[in-house]
Image (cartoon, rainbow, N blue to C red):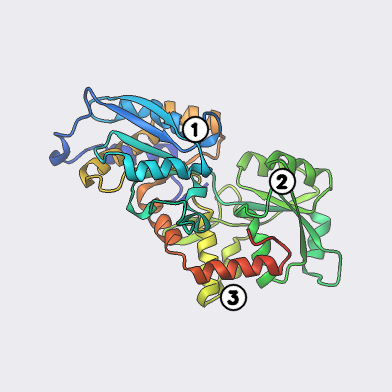
Amino acid sequence: MSNIMGTIGASALLATALAFSIVPSAHAEISFAGKQVTVIIGSKAGGGTDGQGRLLGAFLGEHLPGKPQVIYSNIPGSSGIKAINHFATRVKADGTSVLSASSVSLEPTTLKRTEVVKYDPREFAMIGGVTAGGTVMVIKADAKARLMDKGGQPVVVGAVDATRTGLSMAVWGAEYLGWNVKWVIGYSGTSALMMAIQQGEIDMTGTSSMRQIQRLLDNNKLTGFVQAGDYEDGKFVGRTTFPDIPVFPDMVLPKVDGVAREAFESWLYSNQVGKWFALPPKTQPEVAEIYRSAYRNIMADPRFQERAKREFGEDFEPMWAEGLTHVVKQLASTSDEAMKFTTAMRVKHGLPAE
């Protein structure tokens, strides 16, 4: 599978981590010996954000110089906004606090809620993140021909709600590729969607989970249709595990320009982030580099890899600080005009504005 900085096999990942583990001599005096590092988690205990934050913390103390004690502080509320506001405004930038957050806190629609959001993610020192890869849309084989037939019965797209990022491919497909679709929203979760398409309740849906995608593709009545792709070396590419499924950006990008292109690219970038980890604004570059080096070493640790794949699936992949920083910058810079364009397009095709 490719990820935000490219596909890295276990051996290559280890070699990369070892190279970055050599901290410049100017940083050698920085030590966390005798200190306590708090992982601030933007959710209640349990769930993906909490689980990945605690998994990182379980190895963080080993890989930071001085081997500090690591503790956890859950601050749930407003889809992580409460914790991030606290992190941005109340936490000392001395390397003793780390944020564990989810992608919803980086969505342009979230960041524009200035009456609630008191942080600018571009000011954080990004450590790294994780991604499960871009969404793959799966369609019933006997419904595929109807997709381009505007006079026929619409292809039914199932979704949990109207805002899931990956499934927004169907909106862009309807607008720029002529897809004939309608939506059924309100499913309880991804598992319910997987069951619904296998039982014939819906014609098309999507997920980023490799395990769930493969289970669907093993059903000869279903086929992989398009994939959002992963951002790698300045372009969007297909996941290596699904090389024969067309990459959606290749189909739409040639058809959009101006504000439509900005809106589409903002949507593409929002697909890339799963969970992310950061240090507070004004963190010294030397401290940030030590954390990034530790993060690379953790991702290469065989014990971490085993636990991550066991707890979160085989498609658990790292996202390096450089790529995460770029994606965050793009999302936070999304203009009001681009957001209005997306909203109007959603309404046009039968979805609520939010």
Give the quadrant of residue 95: top left
Q: Is 236 drawn above or below residue 31 in the view shown?
A: below
Query: Which dot, 1 or 3, sits closer to the camera?
Result: 1
Q: Which residue is mark 2?
A: 217
Q: Write the residue at 45% across / 42% down.
A: 82
Left or right: where 146 falls relative to 213: right
Q: In the rendering, at what x and y percent does residue 313 appear?
A: 57, 35
Could you say which is closer to the camera, residue 287 or residue 292? 287
- Numbered label attached to residue 186: none
| Vertical arrangement, residue 145 with respect to residue 323, above or below | below
Which residue lies under the disc numbered 1? 50
181 and 293: which one is in front?
181
Check disc 2 and give the amino acid type. Leu
Element marked by disc 1: helix
- The residue pinned by badge 3 equals 255
Helix, strand or loop at mark 2: helix
> What is the three-letter code of the residue carrying label 1?
Asp
The residue lying at 28 percent from left, 31 percent from top is 64
Residue kind at label 3, given as amino acid type: Lys
